[in-house]
Image: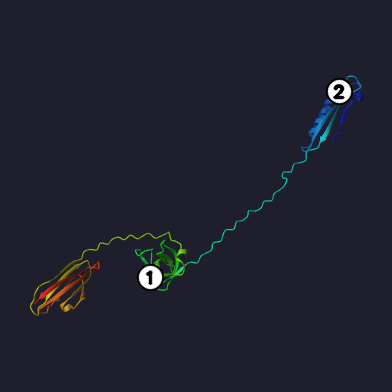
Amino acid sequence: MYESAVLDLRDVGIIGIAHLKARFAGLLLLLITLACSQGPDSTATETIMVIPSPITGMTSVQSTLQPTEAPAPTPLLSAITPIRPPTQTKMPTTTQLPTPESAVRASSANLRAGPGTNYDVVMVLNRGEVLKVTGRLADGSWLEVETSSGRVGWVALSVIDLDSSIDIIPIERNIPPTPIWTATVIPTPSVNFNADADSVSVGQCTMLRWKVENAQAIFLYGGEYGDPPGLMITGHEALSACPQPPATVYTLHVITLSITTRLRMKTRLHL
């Protein structure tokens, strides 16, 4: 690849030492230039040979540049391993259980806002009405259901028939809060009933007067006002009374706001 450059002092003759040095420096410069002109892929090894000359005191210098083969490039990857896509794991399929249904067994049933008789009634269900069961209490005594019209509420298990086992119905955890009932103070009724005269002559009449407060209903019976329940009256009235011999009893019947309490006040008119 490179040619040898040989400088033999025998061919030159006797020349000056200064001229020889100039020739030698030029040769070195040429060799350096050739070495630098090589590409990055090859290297060269320089060999300098000293040849003795027959001329006394002279030496022939031979410099040889021998090319050195560049090493073979090392492959970046000896083998490329193909990348396989990840294997998809099949999720287990969940079997969807049918939604249990029920039918109202009683002649009627209350659909309530919560699981208990202390909850308000949402609507009244008729016998045979089909309900979709969506939940239950842990003890199974009450079921959360949905009507065909979309109304959601609770019914007692005792008033319906289930078409499946109660064990497959999920337990409902979101229970409506228990309603707080506040006691209503019922005022005490006030009743005042009397006649203008306790006794009258035959054929004469007198006045019956009353004043009743905090009552739900008031009735007057006896004599000309008939048997119970008699005449329904208001809380502030006055009516005439014409008793028959030997005596007539007039009764004021008061039904209070609590309904369970009934007051009867009587007045007897003598002839």
Dividing the picture into quarters, in which one does residue 113 lie?
A: bottom left
The three-letter code of the residue at mark 1 reads Ala
Tell me if residue 85 comes above or below residue 203 in the rendering. above
The three-letter code of the residue at mark 2 reads Leu
Q: Residues within 10 Å of mark 2 (few under 14, many from 20)?
A: some
In screen coordinates, is 212 left or right of 75? left
Q: Give the structural element (helix, strand or loop) at label 1.
A: strand
Asked whether 204 or 173 is in front, the reply is 173
Identify residue for label 1: 109
Q: Most extreme residue toward the top, as rendered?
A: 56
Say which mark, if any, is on residue 20.
2
In screen coordinates, is 136 left or right of 205? right
Tell me if residue 228 comes above or below residue 59 in the rendering. below
Where does the image place residue 159, in percent across and percent down from the top left? 39, 70
Asked whether 39 or 124 is in front, the reply is 124
Q: Earlier in the sequence, mark 2 or mark 1?
A: 2
Where does the image place residue 28, in percent across and percent down from the top left? 82, 28
Asked whether 73 or 165 is in front, the reply is 165
Q: Residues within 10 Å of mark 1 (few under 14, many from 20)?
A: many
Closer to us: mark 2 or mark 1? 1
Where does the image place residue 237, in percent across and percent down from the top left? 17, 72
Where does the image place residue 202, in percent across and percent down from the top left? 8, 79
Q: Quadrant of the N terminus?
A: top right
In screen coordinates, is 169 left or right of 37? left
